[in-house]
Amino acid sequence: MIAIACDHAGIDLKPAVIAVLDELGIIYKDFGTFSHGSVDYPIYGARAAKAVASGECDRGIIMCGTGVGIGMAASKVHGIRCVTCTDTYSAKMSRLHNDANMLSLGARVLGTELAKDIVRVWLMTEFEGERHARRVGMINKLDDGEELE
Ligand code: RB5
């Protein structure tokens, strides 16, 4: 199951993300927001991120105006590696090499079709593991407050 969430600036992109999830037959849980009324993006980023971190959801896709703020907020939740993407290559590599477990998108940055392509490639690409697992493990150590050397 995929967690999705957005703020008021991301809400117009949410139907496009849901359309890709439906196209791929992937179930999702929507953590809001549900209207254009102004809200604070960290609340929604954190709600989706906590669902991913707890294991309730496998991964998450979140949206705000730029994708930046909501992504920053999500990555502050322990265990979250959120990538803000504006291109499909970064989306693919964030899965192959970084095992990104959340994707953030900017509704004021991306056209709908590019956003849908980013979501498709991000959802369909698996982590490569091997040497990349060691490096992701180092990111996780930093998340745990540990030293790397
Ligand atoms: C809201 O105006 C906007 O600041 C927010 O959606 C996001 O772009 C923040 O990073």
Image: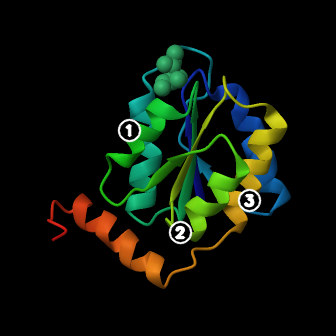
Q: CA distance from mark 3 to mark 2?
A: 14 Å
Where the N terminus falls, by quadrant? Answer: bottom right
Does 16 sit left or right of 51 as displayed?
A: right
In this view, the residue in front, 138 or 27, is: 138
* Amino acid type of the residue that numbered disc 1 sits on in the rendered structure: Ala
SS for dot 3: helix
Q: Nearer the viewer, mark 3 or mark 2?
A: 2
Whether label 1 touches label 3, CB < 8 Å: no
Name the kind of residue labelled 3 in the image.
Val
Residue 1 seen anywhere in this rendered image of the structure: no
For residue 6, what is the image quadrant? Answer: top right
First in sequence: mark 1 vs mark 3: 1
| Number of the front mark, 1 or 2 | 2
In front: mark 1 or mark 3? 3
Residue found at the very far bottom of the displayed protein: 130
Determine whether 133 is above or below 118 in the image.
Answer: below
If you read the primary sequence from the N terminus, does the residue marked by circle 1 or circle 2 appear first?
A: 1
Residue bearing the label numbered 3: 121
Q: Which structural element holds mark 1?
A: helix
Answer yes or no: disc 3 within 8 Å of ligand 1: no
Residue underneath mark 1: 73
Query: Residue at left 63%, top 73%?
Result: 126
Earlier sequence position, callout 3 versus callout 2 = 2
- Let me know if residue 149 appears in the view: yes
**Within 10 angstroms of label 3, few (less than 14), some, or many (20 or more) residues?**
some
